[in-house]
Amino acid sequence: MSEIFNIISMTEQEKMLASKIYDSSDEELVKMRTKAHRLSHDYNHCYDDETEKRNAILKQLLPHAGKDLYLQSPIQFDYGVFTRFGDRCYANFNLVILDCAKVTIGNDVFFGPNCTLATPMHPFLSSERNMKTHEDGSLYNLEYAKPIKIGNGCWIASNVTICGGVTIGDDTIIGAGSVVTRDIPSGVLAVGNPCKVIRKLTEQDSIYLKQELF
């Protein structure tokens, strides 16, 4: 009974971050999304050499970012404030982060082009998923979200989608085109749809053992 009371007394933002069903049309959430979308747009319309301008936008969009973050535009964030980057992270073109739940990214994480981190979850039954109508006639839908966590030293290759609720361990590689629907441990190569562990990474993977590269 107390849990039901606690949920009723929560704001829509608090419900969202607690992975509870929430109303995404909530006025405060709409304002936050609008701000993040505008900042994403502004960042995307900067030239690569407009470093100071880009950094100033990122400080507003991603207040919890670590040092030496580089995001190649275009980018798109739903909120920004719920995403945390570690130090020295890099993302190639078209990084999309729908951070309705918290997204935590460690140090030295690389993203290839066209990567998506999607925390939102929707009901499976269409009757529950379809748009609904408030008393004032405005439309809304019910959804929930699950957090995403990526450890230190990961490489997320091109065209990877990471779904809500997933944790990826340190030093792991997610191969191109993968759809990650469940947790992946540290220190492995994982590929596929759904993404599965292929093998562990070892010292035998060192570039210095590949004579054709030098």
Image: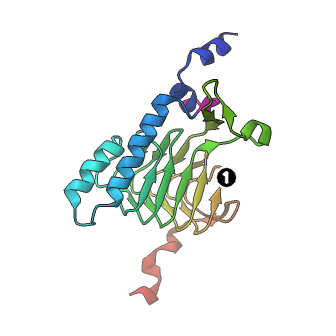
142 in magenta: no
Q: Residue furthest left?
A: 52
Whether residue 82 is visible:
no
Q: Residue at x 43, y 66 (%)?
A: 93
From the top left corner, tell me how far across and down residue 135 is, in percent.
64, 23
Q: Between residues 212 and 150, which one lies in front from this camera angle?
A: 150
Percent across and percent down for residue 18 are 57, 29
Q: Is residue 75 above or below residue 167?
A: below
What's the residue type where badge 1 is placed?
Thr
Q: In the image as oriented, which residue stretches furthest toward the front?
A: 137
Q: Quadrant of residue 73?
A: bottom left
Residue at 54% over, 56% down: 116
Q: Which residue is mark 1?
A: 181
Q: Using the rendered view, name the quadrant where residue 23 is placed.
A: top right
Q: How is the image coloured?
A: rainbow
Q: Residue at x 43, y 42 (%)?
A: 34
120 in relation to 194, above or below: above
> For the residue carrying disc 1, how many other residues have a C-alpha within 10 Å: few (<14), some (14-19), or many (20+)?
some
Please state the horizontal and vertical placement of residue 198, each as a whole percent of the image: 66, 66
| Camera-nearest residue between 103 and 130 | 130
Looking at the rendered image, the quarter that the N terminus falls into is top right
Give, as a single range, the part of the protein colored magenta: 17-23
Q: How many marks?
A: 1
Q: 113 or 104: which is nearer to us? A: 113
State the image coordinates of residue 21 (x, y, percent, origin top left).
65, 30
Residue at the bottom extreme of this rendering: 212
50 relative to 81 in the view: left or right: left
Q: Secondary structure at mark 1?
A: loop
- The quadrant of the image that shows the C terminus is bottom left
Residue pictured at 53% horizontal, 29% vertical:
26
